Image (tube, rainbow, N blue to C red):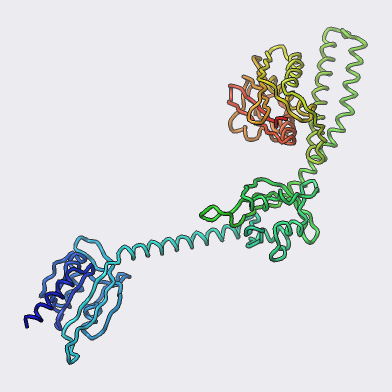
Amino acid sequence: MASRTNRLRFVEAALASVADGVIIVDAEGYRVFVNDAARTLTQMVPSLESPVENQAVDVKMRRVDGSPLSPGETPLGQALRGNTVTDLPVIIGRPDGTDVYVSATASPVPDEQGKITGAVVILRDITERKLAEEERERWLEGAEEERNRLRALIETAPVGIVFYSAPDGHAELFNKAAEEVLGQLPPPGATATEQAAFYTVSLPDGSPFPNEQLPLVRSLRGEVCVGVEMLIYQPSGSKLYLLVNSSPLRDPKGNITGAVLVFQDITGIKEQEQLRDEFISAAAHELRTPVTTIKGYAQLMRLWAPEGHEPREAAALAVIDSQCNRINRRVQEMLEAARFRTVPPELHYVRFDLQDLATQVVERMKAVTQTHRLVLKREGPVPVEADRERIEEVLVSLVDNAIKFSPQGGEITVRVWPRAGEGLVSVKDYGMGIAKERQPHVFEPFYEYVPYGTPGYRGTVTLSLYLAKLTVERHKGRIWFESESGKGSTFTFALPLA
């Protein structure tokens, strides 16, 4: 008997030391043993006299979906009926108002004749695991919702969207707009260059598009391409102009896994631009002849009677001659703009110093104004290789604009200096400046950046800044400006150093 008592003490000591909660009940459902882990888990010190019928109420035991368990459905209740319960997830409500998720395992305890004399339940705290699972489930549901939104957005987008896999650029997914624009999908498994050949991808002027410069190829190398224009031919033979953006796709480690191409059909816009250019070119040619005639007769009349037949006549003829020159400049700008958009003029590259060019331009422009003081700041040699005549036109346009839009006179500073592999030229004035809301449009053709009705409005639009931008960019340079309304502007362009 003493030996059996000792063995029971050993068992109780062992059960008391385990991390899981252990509860033992007799055949009537009264508790005969509760270890410390079970008390801590439930935050209760239940009376050993409480029968199993009350245990579900004591610990507010319920299913994981929140529905309550009847006494016979609890793990101990089932074990007392001879059933074994394994890893049943349940929720236990504690007195402090918190809930714990528990994995319950219960089994009956029979005597030698097989009669059930009690039951034992083991409770394991799985709150952290369950909360993590619920969080993961919420995340997966959210991710699925985001995927559905993205899928709907891609499918209904008014622009073509195509996803490609790395490294060869096999097309994986076309949205509806892409299928409509392309007319026919490329052969399955076609590489990036094979797809370009399938659609006869060309530059906007019709010349071949270099494979290494294709937006898809560049993005598969890791580049982001924005605003690339290209010409393609549908399998039906229809010609389309596309505006293309592309970007690489990367995995969490930064490895390129593919690329996405977004494009829109701008054929209609191109056709309208072509009609506009044709109209501008025709109008310019029509204007040139009568303006030349008017200017010629005005010059003859000044030659025949330099002082005029009366005092006001000489001044009038001078105005006619000046305004003819102004119209001629606008006509020339219109022809240049039309030519740039169709067949850009050939560039004749020579090596020269931007400082020498700036010196000549500043000296010549001093004769144009009597109210401005032109200052040249030179900082070391600035050798470049470019079309000198075209770059001179750019600088003259910038200085002319500085004079025009600082009507009160004052200083205009032309600065030339080298920096980080570039030769820079800036023209700074202290005139009226450009309003912030108009600044994004300054380099657009036919845009008057001094609005109607404001001081300094001249009632004309020019193409000089638009042509300057085209010229500088054709030299692989860049042009930009800084301006504040009422305080003046600084226009700067940069060319690669020779």
Task: Give the vertical position of 288 relative to 124 (above or below).
Answer: above
Outermost residue on the bottom side: it is 113
Residue 267 in sight here: no
Displayed quadrant of residue 458: top right
Task: Give the vertical position of 143 relative to 359 (above or below).
Answer: below
Task: Give the vertical position of 476 relative to 1 (above or below).
Answer: above
Q: Nearer the viewer, residue 267 or 48?
A: 48
Outermost residue on the left side: it is 2
Q: Residue 286's spot in the image, x, y percent? A: 87, 33
Q: Residue at x 74, y 23 (%)?
A: 353
Task: Give the vertical position of 298 relative to 202 (above or below).
Answer: above
Displayed quadrant of residue 33: bottom left
Q: In the image, is 435 to the left or to the right of 444?
A: left
Q: Residue 315's spot in the image, x, y percent? A: 82, 12
Q: Nearer the viewer, residue 446 or 203?
A: 203
Q: In the image, is 351 to the left or to the right of 144?
A: right
Outermost residue on the front side: it is 3
How many numbered marks does the figure carry?
A: 0
Displayed quadrant of residue 487: top right
Residue 101 in sight here: yes
Q: Residue 397's spot in the image, x, y percent? A: 73, 25
The quadrant of the rendering that contains the N terminus is bottom left
The quadrant of the rendering that contains the C terminus is top right
Q: Nearer the viewer, residue 455 or 241?
A: 241
Q: Residue at x 30, y 78 (%)?
A: 86
Q: Residue at x 45, y 60 (%)?
A: 142
